[in-house]
Image (spheres, grey):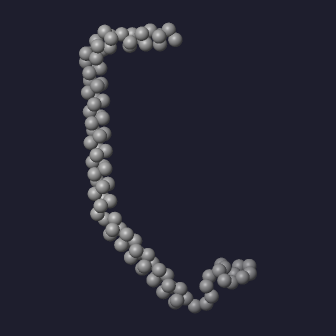
Amino acid sequence: MVLRRLLAALLHSPQLVERLSESRPIRRAAQLTAFALLQAQLRGQDAARRLQDLAAGPVGSLCRRAERFRDAFTQELRRGLRGRSGPPPGSQRGPGANI
């Protein structure tokens, strides 16, 4: 508790803060922090630009591909059901009927 008060009193001293800001480790930490923030900002902008480009182009083609897949799947399903003989699955009753 006493140490916390002492540290708080020292950090509120303008002379100490200025002397610390001129020290090499504090300056280096500030440089690294600024570098990390700038890199994060640039990467975020790059990712946003790539997402925007991705959303602008192939979304229409993706929808068309999904529609073609749906149509082909339903056609194959109908062909398969037409080619089967006998009652549809699940229509039999009794024990062991749907095995």
Q: Residue at x 32, y 54 (%)?
A: 51
Name the quarter where the C terminus is drawn. Answer: bottom right
For the residue pair 59 and 82, the one nearer the viewer reads as: 59
Left or right placement of residue 78 versus residue 95 in this view: left
Relative to 81, is 69 above or below?
A: above
Dividing the picture into quarters, in which one does residue 33 lie? top left
Question: In the figure, 66 relative to 14: above or below?
Answer: below
Residue occupying image coordinates x 32% and y 69%: 61
Residue at 29% in and 20% down: 26
Q: Residue furthest right?
A: 94
Horizontal and vertical percent position of residue 70:
44, 75
- Is 22 rendered above or below residue 86? above
Q: Position of residue 75 (x, y in %)?
A: 45, 83
Where does residue 63 sit, x and y in percent of width and height?
Answer: 37, 69
* Number of callouts: 0
Residue shown at 34%/65% (left/top)? 59
User: Residue 92 is drawn in which quadrant?
Assistant: bottom right
Residue 98, x across and y down, in percent: 66, 79
Q: Looking at the image, is 10 positioned above or below residue 35? A: above
Asked whether, in this view, residue 22 is left or right of residue 96, the answer is left
Q: Please name whichever residue, 97 or 11, is drawn nearer the observer in this view of the structure.
A: 11
